[in-house]
Amino acid sequence: MRQATVVLAIILLSLSAAAEPGAGRSDAPKSYTLEAVIAAGLDNNPDLQARRSATEARKAAWGASRRWANPTLGLEAGKGYPAGTEASVDIGGIALSQALENPVKRKYRVEAFENEWRAAEHDLRAEEIAFISGVKVLFARILHLRRLETISRADAGSLESMLALVRRRVELGESRELEALKIEVETLRGRNDLHRVQADLHLAREELNGFVGGSLPPDFELDGEMTYEPGLLDETALLARADDSHPLILTRRSELAAARSRLGYVRWQRLPDPVISGFTGDEMDGRKTGVGLSFEIPLWDFKSRAVDEATGLALAAESALRAARTSVGLGVRAQVNRMRLTARTLDLFRGGLMKQAEESLRIADVSFRQGELSLLDYLDSRRTHYAILRDYEEALLQWQVDRAELEKASGVLEPGDASEDPRGE
């Protein structure tokens, strides 16, 4: 009996622990990779959702354009009064008519709707690539500020340590009060730099979460590192691929195809569509049944104005395509040059400048602690060292930004994102 009571108590305690709020949950912030942030943003960004709805509407309009026109049903009923008599006769009938669209005109009309849908799809893809580029820039900025926070915290901590050293020297009479005041001001500057970086980091996190439609929790963390992978930029290959597959160029090509289809449709409107009808009904002297054929006579409107308008729109679409190809080419060339310049800057830092700065600060620190270097020279050496660190981090961030902007300019995503649909669907 006692054993059964103990077992029952253990079961009840287990159930109570499982029912507690937060049981089995980790309070640690969830960490998101770049791919996870992009996927969440593509699903939740309101601008992209609006464009997808507009694209679906274009697709639905294309599907509806392939249907035939509805037939027309006519009903007549009344009284007839034959001449010479006061009697009345019931008369009436029914007629059914169907317009037969010219097959060539129908082809142009359906093609116009299809190309408008294709243009909307390409435009959506361009917006998605631009969105992915924007996420990468914001993601890199947060990583950059996180690294700056680490540097600023180390700087502030080192200054705190050095301030304590100088104060001890002042107490021992080895240094003047002025030196303590100088390094105290420098320590305050270091704290302010740290607080500024932390504020910028908070704002950058909010900006990223807003950009992806608020799909991340408030305490989210990012899983990633700032990397630099130098490589040969093949400008010719990028230009050729962009000319073939850039969404903006594909959009303009589809718009041009739609404008030409509209022009063909308007021209063929000059040839009226036949309307076939069948009828049957009662007349005063008997019953009539038969078929009919009718045409619209283009007497007052020969579609000349509509043809001129459609021709002008087609010419405008041709010019828009040429402008898009020129714009894309210039954008790719400019971004490639920016990446090359940033790469040269990073190579300069990594080629020995960083090591020299580290060694210079180490020597200055040792020399100051041993009394062989003045405070002003030591502070100047510190400022130079941390300025080099921050400049390197800025160049590393610029490399990430340039790479994302090159993807946007060329319309070519990195291999991990280079599916036909950026969402991988």
Image (spheres, rainbow, N blue to C red):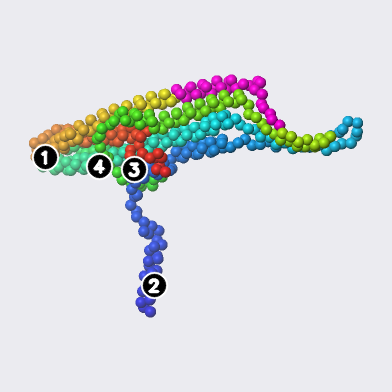
- Is 297 in front, or is 292? 292
Which amino acid, mark 3? Leu
Tell me, yes or no, whether the two marked residues, 3 and 1, touch with CB atoms within 8 Å.
no
Identify the secondary structure beneath mark 2: helix
Which residue range is magenta in the image? 292-319
Give residue 150's mark: 4
Give the labeled residue for mark 1: 366
Q: Earlier in the sequence, mark 3 or mark 2?
A: 2
Q: Earlier in the sequence, mark 4 or mark 1?
A: 4
Q: Nearer the viewer, mark 3 or mark 1?
A: 3
Neighbour tally class for label 3: few under 14, some 14-19, many 20 plus, Cα within 10 Å:
some
Relative image position of residue 198 (x, y in whole percent): 30, 41
Q: Nearer the viewer, mark 4 or mark 3?
A: 3
Left or right of 113? Residue 204 is: left
Tell me how far mark 1 sits from mark 2, CA to CA. Answer: 68 Å
Q: Earlier in the sequence, mark 1 or mark 2?
A: 2
Neighbour tally class for label 4: few under 14, some 14-19, many 20 plus, Cα within 10 Å:
some
Which quarter of the rendering shows the C terminus?
top left
Relative image position of residue 409 (x, y in whole percent): 36, 31
Q: Earlier in the sequence, mark 4 or mark 3?
A: 3
Identify the secondary structure beneath mark 3: helix
Which amino acid, mark 2? Leu
Q: Earlier in the sequence, mark 3 or mark 1?
A: 3
Identified at 38% across, 63% down, the residue is 17
Give the labeled residue for mark 2: 8
The answer to whether residue 56 is above or below residue 336 is below
Identified at 29% across, 30% down, the residue is 234
